[in-house]
Amino acid sequence: MPSTLMRRALGLLLGVCLLALAVPAARAAVIVQCPGDNNGDADLVDVGDTPDPDRVVRCMHLTGGDGYAVMADGRRQYTFGFHDLTGTAIGQVINEGRMKANWPSPLIARDEGDEFFLTLTNVGMVQRPDLFDAHSVHFHGFPNSSSIFDGLPESSFGINMMSSLTYYYNVVKAGTYMYHCHIEATEHMQMGMLGNLYVRPAQNRYPDGHPLGALPAGKGAAHVNGDYALNPNQDDPLVGYKYAYNDGDGSTYYDVEYPIMMGGFDSNFHDADEFVQPLNFADLEDNYTMLNGRGYPDTVNTAPGAIVNVNGFEAQKTPSLISVNSGQIILLRIVNLNVTHFWGLSALGLPMKVIAHDADLLQTADGSQKLYYLTNSVTIGGGGSVDVLIDTTGLPTGTYPLYSTLLDHLSNPSEDFGGMMTEIRIN
């Protein structure tokens, strides 16, 4: 009997081996899909590209991998993240994308009416060659018509190492969103695979001084009611007034906008991930709190190369210093993608007008009445966003702190260095 079982086992093993030889091996490759892009770099401004004049197409190429960030007290933290390689030749993507994780991930800002093609290439983990993690892009809260492009592992799929996938989005709803990797989400998000994302409204395409109201049917219409034209410059639709939403009455007008991502790192978790130790998910507790991937005073440092990791790469490219001229209106697009905390922000001495929660304008169902409200602080849970307008008209010039209402988060383990705080400077 044992010899019979052994022969059957060997026969089964031989059959599996023959079947494996008969099936062609799957080939990993960097492939960029962008209509009109003829050299595969996802950049439509190159000579020789042939974009369709009847479509507003935007393309972008991100890589997913690992890297390092530096905390305000000088401590180095191992991270996962995305990196923007739009404009890079296909043959250079893998080498150029390694150890280039950004914290936070590159900003994605699109305009309502765009067709957006986003390619993600997984370049692998240099510091953790034992990891073969897939990555994905999930537009959190964004109305996506196709679940296959949603990045959720249950209904979609991840991108394996040395492979690419191009996501397609029909950008139809203005608002403040965010994006993150949804594969092994708690780990990958804690490690830094988070980014700011917002969609600017079609209302911005009206020329200055036009009457606001119902938006025209059809993208790129020449005239509305025969008396004013839409801005024909599709490459820069923000040549006129700027609005946060299609409000119909101009109430979300602003002069300058700033994306603000509240977040934090658990240094013990990051160290364990770097040095191949068990990950303690149950005891996650962020001891480094940041705005746009920086702790104070790095939040207000805008000098090139100000935040440089151990490999000389500027991983933290997004300062959060807010500088305006007196009389301007500031739009703060505040998001929280943290997996451990609710976060709160307060602007000392400045009135904060909240106009939207979670990419929905605060108004009655028929739009006849706005439900905006004034406050001096906002609190957001993980996965939430708030749009805030600050009108500086009549306010004294000077520096105003924008800081965490959880006062123990105003410094990191080394007192006086780090923490969730930045400055609003009115000139």
Image (cartoon, grey):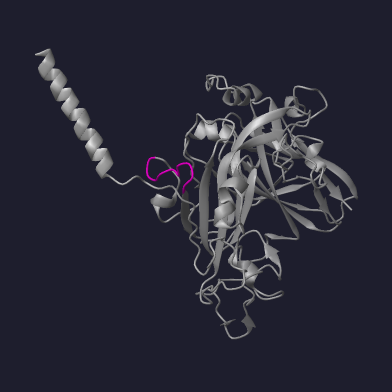
Against 423, residue 29 (above or below) is below
Query: Looking at the image, which is closer to me, 313 or 74?
Result: 313
Q: Residue at x 75, y 34 (%)?
A: 295
Query: Looking at the image, which is closer to me, 417 or 258?
Result: 417
Q: Quadrant of the N terminus?
A: top left
Q: Which residue is drawn at 45% across and 42% down?
A: 160
Against 313, residue 258 (above or below) is below
Locate residue 422, reporting x and y percent: 79, 40
Does the magenta-highlighted stretch encompass residue 161? yes
Locate residue 159, reporting x and y percent: 45, 44
> Residue 350 vs residue 266: left or right?
right
Against 121, residue 206 (above or below) is below
> Residue 273 vs residue 68: left or right?
left
State which quadrant residue 394 falls in.
bottom right
State which quadrant residue 257 falls in.
bottom right
Number of numbered discs: 0
Q: What stretch is highlighted in magenta?
A: 154-163
Magenta segment, prevailing SS (helix, strand or loop) = loop
Residue 105 at least partly seen:
yes
Residue 359 at least partly seen:
no
Residue ranking furthest to the top = 2
